[in-house]
Image (cartoon, grey):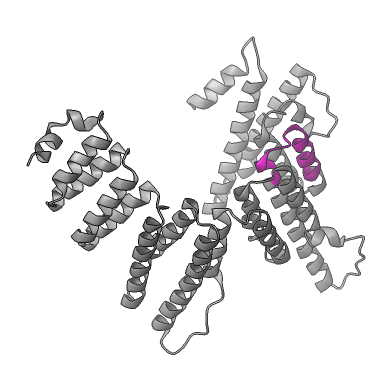
C-alpha cells in the first residue's frame, strides 16, 4: 500500500514528469500479471472480472493522462505512447506481449518490436523477446492449421504462409540479432535456449549451434555448451537391471562430455576452458549416486583434471581453494600440503590465499608451516601478516 500511495502522489503533483507515470504504469501491469499467475496456480476466480477490470482501467487512465499531458502523436494505434516511453525497453516488451496474448494480434506485436529496435538497436532483451514472439506465433499457427486439417477444411498457402508457420521469421530475427550484436557468444547461445522450448524448431536449433561453432570457435562457452549437450543424448534401451543400466548410461554420457572437454583444452588451452571443465566435473561429482563405481570414476576424473590444470599453470585461484578443500575432506594431508605450496607459488601476491593456506597448514600441523610463513612475509611484506600476532607467534620456531 505504501508503494501504491507513493506512486499515486507522484502522478498528482503539480510538477509532473514522464518517469512517474512510467513507474506507476509498470507497477500496475506487473501487479495484474502477478494476480493472473496466482489465480491460474490456485484456480481462484472470485470477482476475477471486477478486479482485473479495475486495474486495466487504471492503466488506461494513466496512459490517457500521460498522452494528453505530453501531446504524444498516436501514429501506431493504441500504443502511440511508445514515444513517451522510448527509453524503457521493458515497456515495449510489455506492450508487444499485450498485443500478442490479450489482443491476439501478432502483427501489432511485430510492429512494436520493430519500432522498439529503432529506439534500442543494440538491445539484447528486445531481440530475444522478438525471437520468442515469432516462435510462439509460428507454433500457434501450426496448431490452428492442424485443427483445420482435422476438420477437413480446405486450406490455401495464403491462409498459412510457409515462412511464418515454419519459423522463418524467427530465423530472420536471429540472423539480424547476431549480425547487429556480433562477438557475444552468450547472447548468441541465448537464442538456442529459447528455440529449445519449441519442438518444431529443431532445424533452427541446429543452425544456431553451427553458427556458434563457426563464429565463436575459441570461446569457452561454446565448448562448455557442446560438452554439456552430450548429457541430453538419447539413453540406451533399458536392460533387466534398471539401476545398473541407468548408472552405466550416465557414465557413458559423462565420458562423452569429458571427451569434448578434452578436445577443448587441447584446441583452446585457456584458463576459462579449464575452469569450465573442472566446474562440470565438480558438479557431476557432487550429484548423489548409490553406485560406488560411478562415484569413484567421477572422483578420479575431477582430481585428474585439477592436477593437469595446475601443471599447465591454468588453474584459477578460486578453484585452487576448492581443490584444497576437497583434498581436506578426502583426508589426503600429504597431497593437500603439496597443493597449498603450489598455489602459494602461483598466486604469491594473494593475501587471502596465503592466509587460508597458512591456517589450513596450522590445522594439519604440517612441518612446512614455518617455511611458508617466511615465504609469505617475503612475498607480501606490507599486509595483515605484519600486524597479526597469532601468525607471528606461529611462525617462530
Pick the front one: 30 or 349: 349
Q: Is residue 252 in view from this perspective?
A: yes
Task: Tell whether 232 sits left or right of 158.
Answer: left
Residue 267 at x, y percent in the picture: 55, 61
Residue 315 at x, y percent in the picture: 40, 52
Q: Please state, as top left, top right, bottom left or bottom right, where the C terminus lies in the image.
A: top left
Q: How many marks?
A: 0
Predominant SS of the magenta segment: helix
**Is residue 113 in the magenta section?**
yes
Q: Is residue 47 in view from this perspective?
A: no
- Whether 173 is drawn above or below 211: the answer is above
Quick one: which residue is furthest to the bottom in this view? 240
- Region rendered in magenta: 109-127
Residue 57 at x, y percent in the picture: 68, 32
Q: Residue at 92% x, 65% y: name it.
A: 156
Quick one: which residue is furthest to the top in this view? 14
Q: Residue at 14% x, 49% y: name it.
A: 363
Q: Residue at 69% x, 64% y: name it.
A: 206
- Whether 378 is drawn above or below 36: the answer is above
Residue 360 at x, y percent in the picture: 20, 48
- Whether 355 is drawn above or below 287: the answer is above
Task: Tell whether 310 sits left or right of 48.
Answer: left
**Is residue 262 in the magenta section?**
no
Pick the front one: 265 or 288: 265
Pick the front one: 320 or 243: 320
Q: Residue at 79% x, 60% y: name it.
A: 141
Amino acid at each position: 500500500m505504501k508503494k501504491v500511495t507513493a506512486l499515486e502522489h507522484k502522478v498528482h503533483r503539480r510538477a509532473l514528469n514522464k518517469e512517474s507515470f512510467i513507474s506507476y504504469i509498470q507497477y500496475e501491469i506487473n501487479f495484474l500479471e502477478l494476480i493472473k499467475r496466482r489465480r491460474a496456480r490456485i484456480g481462484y476466480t472470485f470477482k476475477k472480472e471486477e478486479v482485473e477490470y479495475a486495474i486495466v482501467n487504471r492503466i488506461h487512465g494513466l496512459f490517457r493522462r500521460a498522452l494528453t499531458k505530453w501531446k504524444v502523436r498516436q501514429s501506431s494505434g493504441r500504443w502511440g505512447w511508445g514515444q513517451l516511453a522510448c527509453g524503457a525497453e521493458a515497456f515495449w516488451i510489455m506492450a508487444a506481449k499485450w498485443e500478442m496474448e490479450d489482443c491476439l494480434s501478432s502483427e501489432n506485436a511485430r510492429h512494436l518490436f520493430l519500432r522498439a529496435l529503432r529506439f534500442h538497436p543494440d538491445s539484447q532483451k528486445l531481440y530475444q523477446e522478438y525471437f520468442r514472439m515469432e516462435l510462439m506465433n509460428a507454433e500457434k499457427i501450426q496448431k490452428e492449421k492442424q485443427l483445420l486439417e482435422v476438420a477437413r477444411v480446405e486450406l490455401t498457402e495464403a491462409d498459412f504462409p510457409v515462412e511464418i508457420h515454419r519459423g522463418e521469421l524467427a530465423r530472420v530475427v536471429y540472423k539480424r540479432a547476431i549480425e547487429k550484436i556480433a562477438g557475444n557468444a552468450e547472447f548468441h547461445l541465448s537464442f538456442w535456449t529459447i528455440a529449445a522450448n519449441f519442438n518444431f524448431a529443431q532445424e533452427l536449433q541446429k543452425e544456431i549451434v553451427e553458427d556458434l561453432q563457426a563464429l565463436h570457435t575459441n570461446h569457452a562457452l561454446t565448448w562448455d555448451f557442446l560438452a554439456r549437450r552430450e548429457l541430453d543424448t538419447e539413453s540406451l534401451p533399458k536392460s533387466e537391471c534398471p539401476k545398473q543400466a541407468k548408472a552405466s548410461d550416465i557414465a557413458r554420457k559423462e565420458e562423452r562430455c569429458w571427451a569434448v572437454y578434452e578436445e577443448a583444452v587441447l584446441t583452446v588451452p585457456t584458463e576459462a576452458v579449464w575452469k569450465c571443465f573442472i566446474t562440470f566435473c565438480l558438479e557431476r561429482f557432487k550429484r548423489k549416486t548409490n553406485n560406488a563405481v560411478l562415484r569413484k570414476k567421477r572422483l578420479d576424473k575431477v582430481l585428474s583434471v585439477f592436477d593437469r590444470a595446475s601443471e599447465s599453470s591454468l588453474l584459477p585461484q578460486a578453484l585452487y581453494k576448492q581443490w584444497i578443500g576437497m583434498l581436506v575432506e578426502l583426508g589426503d594431508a600429504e597431497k593437500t600440503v603439496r597443493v597449498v605450496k603450489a598455489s602459494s607459488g602461483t598466486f604469491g601476491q594473494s593475501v587471502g590465499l596465503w592466509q587460508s593456506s597458512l591456517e589450513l597448514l596450522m590445522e594439519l600441523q604440517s612441518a612446512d608451516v614455518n617455511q611458508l610463513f617466511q615465504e609469505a612475509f617475503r612475498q607480501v611484506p606490507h599486509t595483515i601478516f605484519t600486524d597479526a600476532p597469532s601468525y607471528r607467534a606461529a611462525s617462530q620456531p
